[in-house]
Image (spheres, rainbow, N blue to C red):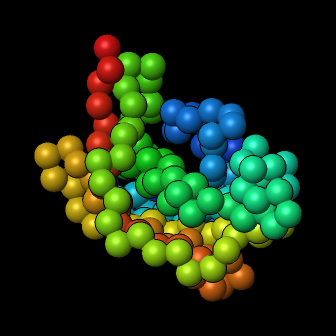
Amino acid sequence: MTDTTDSSMNIHEILEHLPHRYPFVLVDKVISMELGKEITAIKNVTINEPFFPGHFPHHPVMPGVLIVEAMAQAAAILSFKTMDVKPTEESVYYFAGIDSARFKKPVSPGDQIVLNVKIDRVLKGIWKYNGVATVDGKVVAEASMMCILKEIK
């Protein structure tokens, strides 16, 4: 791992470093990243999200598990960039665990989530992160996450 500071990433660069595709891409922009350490990314929440018609029709709220997923996707981008590799069709970046997940405030259409994820440690191919999601400077969710890159073919 290197500790080089890297700049922002647009959606095209994100899609090169994230195996997810529509409708499950939950990171719109990377605003800063320090390889081997941390990433700050953005998720713009719009009424067009596919989950809002069912969650909930009269009071749309982004599911908390998707906020954690957005943090994990930011973590995946950080890991792929840190390893200097890109995801392939022969690999998947899986959750290995989620601990201490807390949801502090609902996220609604029009909100912009700032995702800050820090690498806690890497051991035997398992990456552990601490993530915090904020809207307007207020914590909306936080979690400790573990992920692993697995070959599938």
Q: Is residue 49 left or right of residue 130?
A: right
For the question of whether residue 81 can be seen, the reply is yes
For residue 149, what is the image quadrant?
Answer: top left
Residue positioned most to the left: 124
Residue 23 x, y percent position in the rendering: 69, 37
Whether 63 is drawn above or below 84: the answer is below
Q: Is residue 40 left or right of residue 111?
A: left
Residue 78 x, y percent position in the rendering: 44, 52
Residue positioned most to the bottom: 138
Residue 102 x, y percent position in the rendering: 46, 75
Most foreground residue, 95 or 11: 95
For residue 122, what is the image quadrant?
Answer: bottom left
For the question of whether residue 67 can be seen, the reply is no
Residue 136 x, y percent position in the rendering: 71, 82
Q: Residue visible at 41% across and 70% down?
A: 101
- Indicate the quadrant containing the C terminus: top left, top right, bottom left or bottom right: top left
